[in-house]
Amino acid sequence: MEMLSNSEFETEQAGAALGGRLPAGAVVALYGDLGAGKTAFVRGMAAGMGIKAHVNSPTFTIVNEYLGQRPLFHFDMYRLRSAEELFDIGWEDYLGRGGVCVVEWSENVSEAFDGTEWRVQIDKLGENTRRITIEEGSAPC
């Protein structure tokens, strides 16, 4: 699925639409340049999952946890260089906790994915315009 967003709000709405349909245990791999809107998309995912928390980038903490009916585990792999580092911080434990794991800068840890993840590519087309491409994961929804 592909859509255009002309604002941060529209990017959040796209995230909310996806977040509302993801099952517990889903993994979402986010791709896009710095400033593309990945964190805005995750903010929308949290809202779509009924989570009322303030969502921000976990660049310095590596992972933020947002609790709700289905928890959201928001990873930022910008500072990591390999999947091994992700496993060192407990990736497999997060996968087993029944929440949704969303990973920014997924290209840095591609070996951690098994092919069932949802892939979201956000491309900057202009100052406010983004192309959001969502490839559905093979995990049931």
Image (spheres, rainbow, N blue to C red):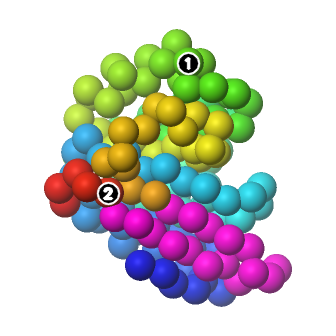
User: Which SS class for mark 2?
Assistant: loop
**60 to the left or right of 16:** right
Residue reaching furthest to the left: 140
Label 2: few (<14), some (14–19) or many (≥20) C-alpha neighbours in 10 Å? some
Residue reaching furthest to the right: 127
Residue toward you, 87 or 129: 87
Instruction: Name the amino acid, label 1.
Output: Glu
Residue 131 percent coordinates (x, y): 61, 79
The picture quadrant where one finds residue 86 is: top right
Q: Main secondary structure of the magenta part?
A: strand
Q: Residue at x 48, y 81 (%)?
A: 2
Q: Residue at x 46, y 74 (%)?
A: 14
31 up-or-down from 101: above or below: below
Instruction: Name the amino acid, label 2.
Output: Gly
- Magenta span covers which residues? 120-136
Which image quarter is the C terminus in?
Answer: bottom left
Residue 75 numbered tag: none
Residue toward you, 76 or 81: 81
**27 to the left or right of 74:** left
The picture quadrant where one finds residue 101 is: top left
Determine if residue 13 is in view. Answer: no
Check disc 2 and report the residue beneath it: 137
Q: Is residue 124 magenta?
A: yes
Q: Mark 1 to mark 2: distance in Å?
A: 23 Å
Q: Residue at x 51, y 73 (%)?
A: 133
Residue 21 percent coordinates (x, y): 25, 64
Residue toward you, 81 or 15: 81
Q: Residue at x 55, y 74 (%)?
A: 132
48 up-or-down from 51: above or below: below
Check disc 1 and report the residue beneath it: 84
Total numbered labels: 2
